[in-house]
């Protein structure tokens, strides 16, 4: 298949992401797999991003909500813990922040050009619960 834009594909098209035997590739960690050129894993959508999520491991409880709900598979997990964000594939939609249950949230959106260390130093403190 030649490299087509998403709007050139027929509705219901099936894209096969692996360059070789899928049963073998699926056993590898996703950053070691051989993906085809047509796969969303090899293409970047980061140029759309205006804001980016920054992950604070000091607040994170490793619930994996962000990992499950990320539409781009851009939340990184290593050794059964969240390890940050893959900024090559993150388009900055903010879903990960919306589903984060911690107080304060362990993922927050910052301007794309802001340094992660600068963002972490500006992290909000825990908010007190409001009494009804």
Image (cartoon, rainbow, N blue to C red):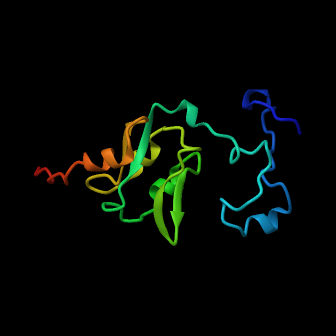
Q: Which of 94 and 49 is in front in this view?
A: 49
Q: Which of 57 and 95 is in front in this view?
A: 57
Quarter of the view holding residue 62: bottom left
Q: Which residue lies furthest to the bottom in this view?
A: 79
Identified at 43% across, 35% down, the residue is: 112
Quarter of the view holding residue 60: bottom left
Residue 61, horizontal then vertical, whole percent: 36, 65
Residue 81, horizontal then vertical, whole percent: 46, 67
Residue 70, horizontal then vertical, whole percent: 53, 49
Look at the image and tell me in which quarter the N terminus lies: top right
25 relative to 45, above or below: below
Residue 21, horizontal then vertical, whole percent: 85, 63
Q: Residue furthest right?
A: 1
Q: Residue furthest top?
A: 7
Identified at 70% across, 62% down, the residue is: 32
Quarter of the view holding residue 90: top right
Is 117 on the left or on the right of 1, as rendered?
Answer: left
Q: Residue furthest left?
A: 131
Identified at 53% across, 58% down, the residue is: 76
Q: Which of 109 and 100 is in front in this view?
A: 109
44 relative to 127, above or below: above
Total marks shown come to 0
């Amino acid at each position: 298949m030649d490299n087509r834009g998403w709007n050139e594909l027929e509705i219901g098209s099936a894209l096969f992401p692996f360059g070789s035997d899928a049963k073998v590739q699926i056993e590898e960690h996703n950053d070691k797999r051989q993906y085809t050129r047509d796969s969303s894993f090899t293409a970047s959508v980061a140029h759309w991003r205006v804001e980016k999520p920054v992950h604070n491991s000091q607040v994170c409880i490793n619930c994996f909500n962000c990992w499950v709900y990320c539409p781009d598979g851009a939340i990184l997990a290593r050794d059964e813990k969240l390890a940050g964000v893959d900024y090559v594939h993150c388009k900055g939609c903010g879903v990960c922040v919306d589903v984060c249950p911690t107080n304060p949230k362990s993922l927050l959106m910052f301007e794309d050009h802001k340094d992660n260390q600068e963002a972490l130093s500006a992290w909000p403190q825990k908010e007190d619960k409001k009494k009804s």
